[in-house]
Image: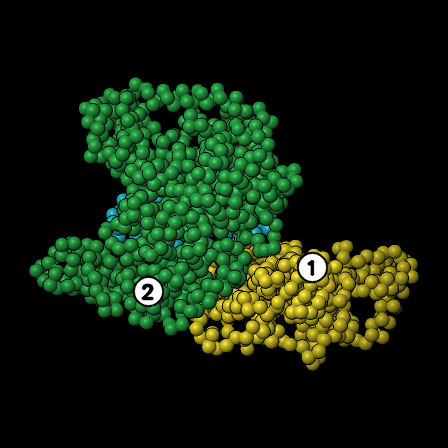
Chain colours: A yellow, B cyan, C green
Amino acid sequence: MVTLYIDDIQVSVEKGSTIFDAAQKVGVYIPTLCHHPELHTFGGCRVCMVEANGKLVTACRAPVTDGMVVRIDAEGARKVQRMVVELLLTKHNEDCQTCVKDSNCKLQEVANYVGITPERMAMLRRSVTEVEIDESNPFFNIDRTRCILCGICIRTCEEINGVTALDFGFRGEHTAVVTMGNKKLAESTCESCGECMERCPTGALARKNYERPNREVKSVCGYCGVGCGIHLGVRGDRVVSVRGDKDNPVNKGQLCVKGRFGYNFVNHPDRLTTPLIKRDGELVEASWDEALDLVASRFKEIIDESGPNALGGISSARCTTEDNYVFTRLIRSLGTNNLDHCARL
Amino acid sequence: MKKEDVKFQEIFSRYKGDREELIPILQDTQAIYGYLTDPAMCAIARFLRVPQSQVYGVSTFFAQFYFTRRGKHAIKVCLGTACHVKGAGRLMEAFEREMGIGCGCITDDYSFSLERVNCVGACAIAPVVMVGEDVYGHVESKRVKEVLETYADKT
Amino acid sequence: MRIKLEPLRQEAVKNWQELQSFGQPIILVGAATCGRASGALDVMAAIGEKMKELEIDAIVRQTGCVGMCHSEVLVDIIKPGRPRITYAKITPELAKELVEDYLVHDNAREDLAICVQGETPDEDLQVRVVMRNCGHIDPNSITDYLAQDGYMGLAKALEMMPQEIIDEVKVSGLRGRGGGGFPAGRKWESCLQVESDQKYVICNADEGDPGAFMDRSVLEGDPHSVIEGMAIAGYAIGASKGILYVRAEYPLAIRQLKIAIEQAKERNLLGENILGSGFSFDLDIFQGAGAFVCGESTALVLSIEGKRGMPKPLPRPRTSEEGLWGKPTLLNNVKTFACVAQIIHRGPDWFKSIGTEKCPGTAVFALTGKVNKCGLIEVPMGIELDKIINEIGGGVAGGRAFKAVQTGGPSGGCLPADMLNLPVDIDSLTAAGSMMGSGGMVVMDDSTCMVDVARYFLEFSLEESCGQCAPCRVGTEQMLTILKDITQGKGREGDIDLLVEMGKAIIDGSICGLGQSAPNPVLSTIRYFRDEYEAHIRDKECPAKACKALITYTIDAEKCQACGRCLKACPTQAITGAKKTPHTIDSDKCDKCGICFSECPDRFAAVLITTGGTESSN
């Protein structure tokens, strides 16, 4: 263990920890834009600058040493923080009201922390690079006028998803997050999982048609057998969002494109809510009792006519393991082993 | 297959397929096509087993690489320090005016492209202009027309 | 090992002496890049043609750059029994005359000669260590190099223990010549101390400073000196592989290096079991694809690995401990390696006798800009700026007033006239707010606007910023925008203080040396030329009359002789007038290109440039 002092608060952390880790342990806030606990440290935004033993260092990278004296609010660090945030704002789309991330935005949070004044901002020259919003992806947009080049999306795509559809492109003032050939996202190798969007600290990567839910319901994703934990965002009687459950040991908060964005069918008017029985060539709504009676009687007829092996059962990957187990018991009890599962098809 | 494409495919036989060969392969590719095409970059990504986005990320980082067709005669106005203090900025403007295109652009007939370079190392004869491999020293704005005319017939 | 080298050397010396005392005249043409740009190849062709025509026998050879770029094309002629004569500014026509006059009629053409015996005119001020062979030997001939005691340093080193070599380098006090000035011996030692199955030696020849071409000249003129230095370093730290990282924009240097590597391999001075010592060392060339930031060690290493050259933020291991592919890597500049071979051969005390106590050795500068004699110079550390500019450089060109000298390229700064007595070394320049950098030195006169110069360097730094860290990326962009505003008369009260504050924050906040030094040109010009900034902001006036937005061109009707030159030359047809009618400029149409100003004959000087109420004419 290593013992250090953060603003005179004594803290002991494991060797190899960073100043940022140590500060978190004692609940001391250090602003940051490019740091993400699930990703490799980047150290590019320079906002987490602190003074350690009299030298300016980035808290996200600097390892702790025994007896280290850290000043979070050192003047030199504050000047760098303030300049970086002010200057990022001069290049940032000012329209916060229409931004999906409004009030949930890291840049707002850090700007608030460093203290932005209109007098200072008036001294600086604004220059937001005009770039068209990439709306090609069906689920989320890339608005580069809100991008602060923290690189979190790039690291997410490489480290979490292993797709690496994104990288930094160009350099200097032209530096941007790009796909191969600077093409639209839909034409890239992106799999639309949306992990980057979830981690984006600003509104640069933002959900389409976003509605803020009134409440959340903890659930399990029904798309496949993995069983990812999710929080369904509900507004009235509609599901309006899904987010991964960070505490779920299966997915630790991560989701795929279907789990994260494929919830709209729940609210669809054509969605089946009762069983249907074909009568005179037309599908007609029926009650569960009617439907189950029909299935049971037809099974019986078929077994009597052609034997149990004329029957077979196909179950679904979208059912839970328990459901699938019960289904196998049912089909086998009918006297046949003709069983399969859609995941094999 | 076009002649260039055949030559491009031959590049791969000279390399092992390791990531550190990326920049030399990009240089060889540009020597064939004159610039880097998207299909070529994707083929290089496959060969080296490097994500496509990273091949593009590396290519766009370095000033040597181009992504659009170049003019037949590439005019490079040196904007190194020595050239700058000897009026290279105005010289560039003179080229822009005379050619009717901005820096970094290509004339409609692909005969000329105009670009800036950050020092060709011939500071003693500043301001310097390079046309292809030819070097012109002590270029004054009024000589711009003359330089362009030298190459106009050669297109 | 020296015994094994001896036969090679003796043969080379014999060749060299034969060459000098041969019955035939020898004609040497400086054919490095600047020579070629001035037409050296045409001169060579003309010489060949004339020789054929007159049926004369002579040996025509190429050499590298001797440094007198102001006098290109340079031709040296050595007639048997005569001293070597250097001729300046030779055109193909003059070359033909020269061949006929001197070789046939024995008229030495003193009118064209600038010096005798290969001595530069200011020999007493210049000391040649790095450039000792440049312009004197044929870079494509290893025997030429061997005849100048080449590879003696390597042969001697191979008889020493690695630590002994490092101790010699440490005693010599050699500091890195790439800009940082880190003691070379200490860097080598830390490489030696790391245990590893593989180590690398990299020579940084990715010279990216605008206005600097020292490394190129050394590679083009004396490639073996760098190769020898790298091999010594390889032996000293225990590396068997070296990489020459050369700008792809230097095709001639790459060609010379390839030839030199082959020649060294043929003579067992590179490759397996060098001179029977058991030490093997291989050299490869990597062509840098054009990124100034790759001067940063971690960025350079990443680019060799096929990645974006984005420097790694601190804290990170030193490249000498964990460099290329995670292995210990020694990275030094071209000139550093070129010094090493001679330090080993001639001993560290010899090296220490040159220069100052803290900065022994020489400094190589590319002296350019508004100075009479542009070119490459090599001076002992500690020489005064004044001597460089006014004696070696021959003073400011065109009789104008000296204003500033810029050193260190985009990382450096501008020093004013009252700093001319500054002794030049790595530390003194840094203390004065500039930098030695890799050796660019640009002289500026009173027609150079310092705000515009600062803007120019910032534009360069921004373009070359790797873009990963916010202070450098958005900070330099903001500073550049403010500077552009100032040069366009849109500066505001408070801008100067804002620039200073922002510059300091960028220095504190940036990841690498590029960002940490990008504000230097702005801070140093504010420090020494603040009044010029104020004139732009308060009076909307550019004292140097260089900022287009702040000047107007007019024609003095009394002086105008209506010669029509300006009228004809004006690209925007802004000038009207007729025969015997003084011309006038329509300011709405005027593009301020300055062509009329340079077209107007000096004896009339009728075109005037006005800024904020002051006037000047040519």
- Report which quarter residue A161 is drawn in: bottom right
Q: Which mark is residue C532?
A: 2
Q: Give the CA separation, mark 1 to mark 2.
A: 50 Å
In front here: A73 or A210? A73
Give how far across and how far down residue C11 sits, in percent. Answer: 44, 20
Subunit that carries the residue with mark 1: A
In front here: C45 or C473? C473
Q: Residue at x 42, y 34 (%)?
A: C222
Considering every residue shown, the one lying at the far bottom of the view is A236
Q: Residue at x 50, y 74 (%)?
A: A94
Hey, what amino acid is under mark 2?
Answer: Glu
On screen, residue C150 versus residue C562, left or right, reads right
| Element type where label 1 sits in the image | loop
On screen, residue C215 versus residue C317, left or right, reads left
Give how far across and how far down residue A217 sits, in percent. Answer: 74, 74
Q: Is residue A34 above or below residue C260?
A: below
Subunit that carries the residue with mark 2: C
Give how far across and how far down residue A324 sits, in percent. Answer: 83, 62
Q: Is residue C254 visible?
A: no
Q: Is residue C392 visible?
A: yes
Hey, what amino acid is under mark 1?
Answer: Asp
Q: Which mark is residue C551?
A: none
| Element type where label 2 sits in the image | helix
Q: What residue is shown with label 1? A: A66
Q: Is residue C436 above or below residue A185?
A: above
